[in-house]
Image (cartoon, grey):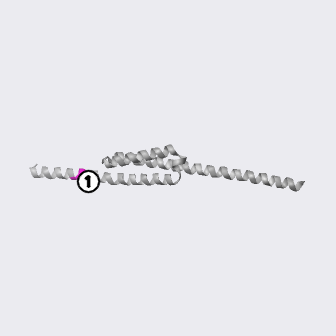
Amino acid sequence: MTTKRVQMLCGAVALLGLAACASDKAPATADVAVSRAAVANATSAGAADLAPAEMQSAREKLMRANQALAAKDYKTAQDLATQASADAQLAQSKANSAKATSAADELQQNIRLLREELNRANSTTQQ
């Protein structure tokens, strides 16, 4: 091979390497953004109070994903972002479940009170 061909081949390999690195950045950046939105949604759902351990885990992984992204460790950033999203979704599900349980308990309490009032009204009319 001539020197020119070797230089062209090296240039092409370097260009392909740079393209591969650039292509890793976009998915990692997108995954971190999705993770950030999942944490925000879980926070809005009250997960910080109703599922604090899961929210803490999601926030820590999101922070580490941002650090990995800044360090250009795109694979780690992507993995941590995916884990943070899963933790945030779990936290949001737990928060929603706790709210539904609370609403069901309140409804049961109201039904019990109505039955008591109905029983009192019936016993008063029968006397």
Location of residue 32 in the rendering, given as x and y in whole percent from the top left corner: 39, 52
Outermost residue to the right: 127
Q: Is residue 113 left or right of residue 1?
A: right
Q: Secondary structure at mark 1?
A: helix
Identify the residue shown where x is 17% and y is 52%.
11
Whether residue 2 appears in this view of the structure is: no
Q: Is residue 29 left or right of residue 106?
A: left
Identify the residue shown where x is 65% and y is 51%.
104
Outermost residue to the front: 49
Q: Is residue 22 left or right of residue 33?
A: left
Identify the residue shown where x is 50% and y is 43%.
53
How packed mark 1 is, by other alpha carbons closer than 10 Å (few <14, some 14-19, many 20 or more), is: few
Q: Which of 14/52 is in front? A: 52
Identify the residue shown where x is 81% and y is 52%.
119
Whether residue 84 appears in this view of the structure is: yes
Residue marked by disc 1? 19
Q: Which of 109/35 is in front? A: 109
Magenta segment includes 88: no
Q: Which of 12/94 is in front? A: 94
Start-end of magenta stretch:
15-20
Which of the image's four quarters has the C terminus? bottom right
